[in-house]
Image (tube, grey):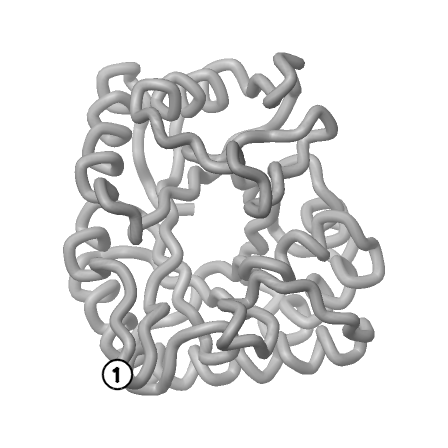
């Protein structure tokens, strides 16, 4: 068995710092770099691409909705064509920095509300997938396991990676519990580790209501901005290795 560890990075901008990217990057295999809409700016993008390349970590685009104040987590009533355009715009920005550093984008993972909208809305999912395909058909689209992001990406001919979350709870239908709910995030490390191993070794997860859900796990999202993020990611790596699971990029 093998699994990828991905983390959302490059989410500082201007005078605002966010997360400990330099410490997290050596522990992961794929970096999702914010592209300036929900977070990030030209200076942070440049630095994050360089750090990822220097550590041999695969680089992915992390495009979001144009919502700095809401960190891209608020739903916006947006047409599919607008989604397509904002995807192309942000992919182009990150590709420029990758070319400057002699590397390339390997995958694309939408951020926040855009990710969740695409998981549930076929038109939004198709616009996301079509934009990625038209930009570079060799890219891998990362989306929520069993969601429309995966099926629509496959329908346009993209390679996909089904994503699972180490520290997020699941609804009975396989969607993530909204961050608006108090129990959306798993704060107990042992519980999160147990969830990770079950998802990777059994392709199953237990919902917040106790229902066992089938899913596919190609990549695990680990968050790098929590109070104990470094220790948490280190423990995940140790647990996966102990179970004989290879950790490698997509």
Looking at this rendering, what residue extends furthest in the front direction? 182
Q: In the displayed structure, does residue 243 sit left or right of residue 35?
A: left
Does the rendering let one see residue 165? no
The x and y percentages for residue 168 are: 49, 35
Comparing 233 with 91, the one in front is 233
SS of the residue under disc 1: loop
5 versus 45 height, above or below: above
Which residue is pictured at 56% across the width and 20% down the height?
205
Q: In the displayed structure, does residue 245 sit left or right of residue 130?
A: left
Q: In the displayed structure, does residue 110 sit left or right of residue 236?
A: right
106 versus 234 height, above or below: below
Which residue is pictured at 34% across the width and 25% down the height?
188
Does the rendering let one see residue 249? yes
The quadrant holding residue 23 is bottom left
Where is mark 1, residue-wise? Answer: 15
Which residue is pictured at 60% across the width and 72% down the height?
65
Comparing 35 with 19, the one in front is 19
The x and y percentages for residue 173 are: 74, 29
Total count of labels: 1
The x and y percentages for residue 161 are: 55, 44
Comparing 187 with 117, the one in front is 187
């Amino acid at each position: 068995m093998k699994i990828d560890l991905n983390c959302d990075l490059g989410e500082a901008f201007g005078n605002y710092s966010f997360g400990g990217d330099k410490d997290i990057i050596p522990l992961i295999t794929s970096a999702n770099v914010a592209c300036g809409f929900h977070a990030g700016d030209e200076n942070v993008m440049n630095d994050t691409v360089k750090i990822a390349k220097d550590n041999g970590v695969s680089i992915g685009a992390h495009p979001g909705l144009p919502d700095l104040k809401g960190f891209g987590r608020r739903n916006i009533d947006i047409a599919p064509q607008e989604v397509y355009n904002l995807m192309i715009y942000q992919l182009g920005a990150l590709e420029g920095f990758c070319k400057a550093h002699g590397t390339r984008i390997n995958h694309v993972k939408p951020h926040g509300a855009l990710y969740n909208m695409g998981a549930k809305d076929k038109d939004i999912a198709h616009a996301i997938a079509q934009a990625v395909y038209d930009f570079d058909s060799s890219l891998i689209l990362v989306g929520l396991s069993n969601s429309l992001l995966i099926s629509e990406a496959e329908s346009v001919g993209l390679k996909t990676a089904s994503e699972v979350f180490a520290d997020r709870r699941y609804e009975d239908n396989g969607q993530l519990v909204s961050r608006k709910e108090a129990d959306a995030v798993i704060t107990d490390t042992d519980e999160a580790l147990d969830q990770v191993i079950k998802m990777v070794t059994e392709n199953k997860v237990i919902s917040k209501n106790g229902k066992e859900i089938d899913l596919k796990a190609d990549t695990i999202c680990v968050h790098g901005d929590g109070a104990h993020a470094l220790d948490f990611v280190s423990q995940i790596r140790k647990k996966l290795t102990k179970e004989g699971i290879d950790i490698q990029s997509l």
